[in-house]
Image (spheres, rainbow, N blue to C red):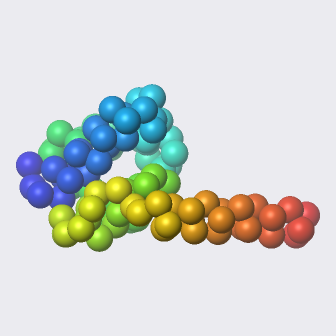
């Protein structure tokens, strides 16, 4: 298993153990990939694509720099998470105004 797959696996296991998600299927569903692809990436049979990793880090509090290089902390900072939540709220409000 390469280092990128190892970090992806570690992050997915962390999300499940911390009860952020109930299953690996939930991870797949939330980032728009088939469960089989997630399983292959976690087992090391397949290397996650950059697009998958970006989707993964957008959907969960996993730091993209960490998953890409191993540098820094795996989990995004509280401040960054608060900003991301606020951006998501503003995007929802914008969509409602467009309707």
Q: Position of residue 65 (x, y in %)?
A: 29, 70
Residue 52 visible to an observer of this rendering: no
Name the residue: 51% across, 61% down.
Answer: 81
Instruction: Report how many numbered discs are placed on residues in the image.
Output: 0
Name the residue: 56% across, 62% down.
Answer: 82
* Residue 71 or residue 58, whichever sits in front: 71
Which of the 4 image quadrants contains residue 76?
bottom left
Which of the 4 image quadrants contains residue 44?
top left
Left or right: 4, with 58 as reference point: left
Residue 15 visible to an observer of this rendering: yes
- Whether 26 is drawn above or below 86: the answer is above
Residue lying furthest front in this view? Answer: 79
Task: Quarter of the image for the C terminus: give it.
Answer: bottom right
- Whether 12 is drawn above or below 93: the answer is above
Left or right: 66, with 30 as reference point: left
* Residue 40 or residue 11, whichever sits in front: 11
Q: Position of residue 35 (x, y in %)?
A: 38, 37
Which of the 4 image quadrants contains residue 62?
bottom left
Name the residue: 45% across, 38% down.
Answer: 20
Left or right: 98, with 49 as reference point: right
Q: Position of residue 94 (x, y in %)?
A: 80, 69
- Whether 19 is drawn above or below 1: the answer is above
Name the residue: 18% across, 64% down.
Answer: 70
Residue lying furthest left in this view? Answer: 1
Q: Position of residue 60 (x, y in %)?
A: 45, 52
* Residue 96 or residue 43, whichever sits in front: 96
Residue lying furthest top in this view? Answer: 22
């Amino acid at each position: 298993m390469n280092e990128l797959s190892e970090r992806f696996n570690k992050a997915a296991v962390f999300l499940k153990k911390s009860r952020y998600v109930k299953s690996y299927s939930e991870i797949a569903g939330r980032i728009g990939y088939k469960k089989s692809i997630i399983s292959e990436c976690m087992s090391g049979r397949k290397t996650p694509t950059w697009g998958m990793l970006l989707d993964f880090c957008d959907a969960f509090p996993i730091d993209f720099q960490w998953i890409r290089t191993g540098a820094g902390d795996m989990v995004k900072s509280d401040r960054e998470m608060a900003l991301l939540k606020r951006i998501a709220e503003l995007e929802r409000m914008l969509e409602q105004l467009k309707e």
